[in-house]
Amino acid sequence: MKPIKFICIAAAVALAGCLTGNMLDKALIKAAEELNKNCPFMVDSETRLDNAMALPDKKLVYFYTMVNYVKDEIDVDVFAESMTPTIINAVSTNTSMEFLRKQKVTFSYQYKDKNGEFFWTLDVTPDMYENHVPIPVFEEAAPAPDTTLTL
Protein backbone atom coordinates (compact mmCIF):
# COMPACT_ATOMS: atom_id res chain seq x y z
CA MET A 1 0.00 0.00 0.00
CA LYS A 2 1.53 3.32 -0.98
CA PRO A 3 2.01 5.99 1.70
CA ILE A 4 -1.08 7.95 2.55
CA LYS A 5 -0.91 11.71 2.65
CA PHE A 6 -2.58 13.80 5.28
CA ILE A 7 -4.66 16.88 5.52
CA CYS A 8 -4.37 19.17 8.51
CA ILE A 9 -6.39 21.98 9.92
CA ALA A 10 -4.75 25.38 9.72
CA ALA A 11 -5.67 26.91 13.05
CA ALA A 12 -4.34 30.44 13.32
CA VAL A 13 -5.74 31.94 16.51
CA ALA A 14 -4.62 35.44 17.39
CA LEU A 15 -4.80 35.88 21.14
CA ALA A 16 -2.68 37.97 23.51
CA GLY A 17 -2.78 35.46 26.37
CA CYS A 18 -3.40 31.78 26.93
CA LEU A 19 -6.72 30.19 26.12
CA THR A 20 -8.73 28.70 28.92
CA GLY A 21 -9.76 25.08 28.42
CA ASN A 22 -13.32 26.13 27.59
CA MET A 23 -12.15 28.69 25.03
CA LEU A 24 -9.84 26.17 23.40
CA ASP A 25 -12.60 23.56 23.22
CA LYS A 26 -14.82 26.16 21.51
CA ALA A 27 -12.00 27.03 19.10
CA LEU A 28 -11.56 23.34 18.25
CA ILE A 29 -15.30 23.02 17.61
CA LYS A 30 -15.14 26.00 15.26
CA ALA A 31 -12.07 24.55 13.48
CA ALA A 32 -13.81 21.20 12.99
CA GLU A 33 -16.93 22.94 11.67
CA GLU A 34 -14.86 24.91 9.17
CA LEU A 35 -12.98 21.82 8.01
CA ASN A 36 -16.24 19.91 7.65
CA LYS A 37 -17.48 22.50 5.15
CA ASN A 38 -14.89 21.02 2.74
CA CYS A 39 -15.59 17.37 3.53
CA PRO A 40 -15.63 14.77 2.27
CA PHE A 41 -12.21 15.46 0.75
CA MET A 42 -10.04 12.97 -1.15
CA VAL A 43 -6.58 13.10 0.41
CA ASP A 44 -5.21 10.69 -2.18
CA SER A 45 -6.60 7.94 -4.44
CA GLU A 46 -7.19 5.61 -1.47
CA THR A 47 -8.01 7.91 1.44
CA ARG A 48 -10.95 10.22 2.03
CA LEU A 49 -11.24 12.61 4.96
CA ASP A 50 -14.92 12.33 5.86
CA ASN A 51 -15.13 14.81 8.70
CA ALA A 52 -13.56 16.08 11.88
CA MET A 53 -14.97 16.43 15.37
CA ALA A 54 -13.83 18.29 18.46
CA LEU A 55 -14.20 16.49 21.76
CA PRO A 56 -13.84 17.84 25.31
CA ASP A 57 -10.43 18.00 26.94
CA LYS A 58 -8.58 19.32 23.90
CA LYS A 59 -9.13 16.45 21.48
CA LEU A 60 -9.55 16.77 17.72
CA VAL A 61 -10.70 13.68 15.82
CA TYR A 62 -10.24 13.10 12.08
CA PHE A 63 -12.40 10.40 10.44
CA TYR A 64 -10.92 8.78 7.34
CA THR A 65 -12.19 6.12 4.91
CA MET A 66 -9.99 3.79 2.90
CA VAL A 67 -12.22 3.91 -0.18
CA ASN A 68 -10.73 0.92 -2.02
CA TYR A 69 -10.58 -1.65 0.78
CA VAL A 70 -12.79 -3.73 3.02
CA LYS A 71 -11.70 -4.53 6.56
CA ASP A 72 -10.81 -8.16 5.77
CA GLU A 73 -8.36 -7.03 3.06
CA ILE A 74 -6.40 -4.81 5.45
CA ASP A 75 -3.56 -6.18 7.55
CA VAL A 76 -4.08 -3.85 10.51
CA ASP A 77 -0.63 -4.53 11.95
CA VAL A 78 1.09 -3.59 8.67
CA PHE A 79 -1.20 -0.58 8.29
CA ALA A 80 -0.41 0.61 11.82
CA GLU A 81 3.32 0.01 11.36
CA SER A 82 3.29 2.15 8.23
CA MET A 83 0.87 4.84 9.34
CA THR A 84 1.90 5.48 12.95
CA PRO A 85 5.27 7.14 12.22
CA THR A 86 3.80 8.98 9.22
CA ILE A 87 0.95 10.45 11.24
CA ILE A 88 3.13 11.34 14.22
CA ASN A 89 5.60 13.01 11.88
CA ALA A 90 2.81 15.00 10.20
CA VAL A 91 1.41 16.16 13.53
CA SER A 92 4.89 16.99 14.85
CA THR A 93 6.13 18.97 11.85
CA ASN A 94 3.15 20.56 10.12
CA THR A 95 3.44 24.30 10.69
CA SER A 96 -0.34 24.78 10.43
CA MET A 97 -0.71 22.62 13.56
CA GLU A 98 1.84 24.55 15.64
CA PHE A 99 -0.74 26.53 17.62
CA LEU A 100 -2.66 23.35 18.47
CA ARG A 101 0.54 21.58 19.53
CA LYS A 102 1.38 24.49 21.85
CA GLN A 103 -2.07 24.06 23.42
CA LYS A 104 -1.31 20.33 23.94
CA VAL A 105 -4.19 19.10 21.81
CA THR A 106 -4.56 15.35 21.28
CA PHE A 107 -5.15 14.39 17.64
CA SER A 108 -7.13 11.23 16.98
CA TYR A 109 -7.05 9.54 13.57
CA GLN A 110 -9.80 7.00 12.99
CA TYR A 111 -9.94 4.81 9.91
CA LYS A 112 -12.75 2.76 8.45
CA ASP A 113 -13.07 0.64 5.33
CA LYS A 114 -15.21 1.38 2.28
CA ASN A 115 -18.20 -0.27 4.01
CA GLY A 116 -17.96 1.97 7.06
CA GLU A 117 -16.35 -0.61 9.38
CA PHE A 118 -13.81 0.93 11.76
CA PHE A 119 -10.51 -0.93 11.81
CA TRP A 120 -7.86 1.35 13.34
CA THR A 121 -7.44 4.39 15.57
CA LEU A 122 -4.34 6.32 16.59
CA ASP A 123 -4.39 8.99 19.29
CA VAL A 124 -1.38 11.28 18.95
CA THR A 125 -0.83 12.76 22.39
CA PRO A 126 1.36 15.72 23.34
CA ASP A 127 4.00 13.34 24.72
CA MET A 128 4.18 11.61 21.33
CA TYR A 129 4.63 14.75 19.24
CA GLU A 130 6.79 16.68 21.71
CA ASN A 131 9.33 13.84 21.91
CA HIS A 132 9.29 13.03 18.18
CA VAL A 133 12.37 13.16 15.98
CA PRO A 134 11.15 14.52 12.60
CA ILE A 135 11.34 12.30 9.53
CA PRO A 136 12.12 14.07 6.24
CA VAL A 137 9.06 14.17 3.98
CA PHE A 138 9.64 14.12 0.24
CA GLU A 139 6.11 13.77 -1.14
CA GLU A 140 3.73 16.67 -1.55
CA ALA A 141 0.49 16.23 0.37
CA ALA A 142 -2.88 17.12 -1.07
CA PRO A 143 -3.68 20.78 -0.50
CA ALA A 144 -5.60 21.44 2.66
CA PRO A 145 -8.84 23.35 2.44
CA ASP A 146 -8.67 26.82 3.94
CA THR A 147 -9.91 26.44 7.51
CA THR A 148 -8.22 29.40 9.13
CA LEU A 149 -9.79 30.03 12.50
CA THR A 150 -10.18 33.40 14.15
CA LEU A 151 -11.82 34.21 17.46
Image (cartoon, rainbow, N blue to C red):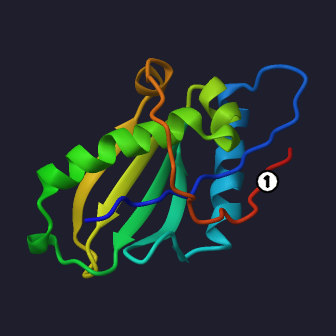
Q: Measured from the top left, where is residue 112 in percent x and y?
A: 29, 67
Q: Measured from the top left, where is residue 81 in percent x and y?
A: 21, 44
Looking at the rendering, in which quadrant would you find the N terminus?
bottom left
Q: How many marks?
A: 1
Judge whether residue 57 can be spotted in this image.
Answer: no
In the displayed structure image, the side of residue 122 where residue 75 appears, left or right: left
Task: Say if 76 sits above or below 102 in the image.
Answer: below
Task: Say if 82 sits above or below 63 in the image.
Answer: above
Looking at the rendering, in which quadrant would you find the C terminus?
top right
Res 2 quadrant in image: bottom left
In the displayed structure image, the side of residue 29 where residue 147 appears, left or right: right
Q: Measured from the top left, where is residue 33 in percent x and y?
A: 67, 62
User: Callout 1, which amino acid?
Assistant: Thr
Task: Say if 68 sits above or below 117 in the image.
Answer: below
In the displayed structure image, the side of residue 65 where residue 61 appears, left or right: right
Report the residue marked by disc 1. 148
The residue at 65%/28% (across/down) is 21
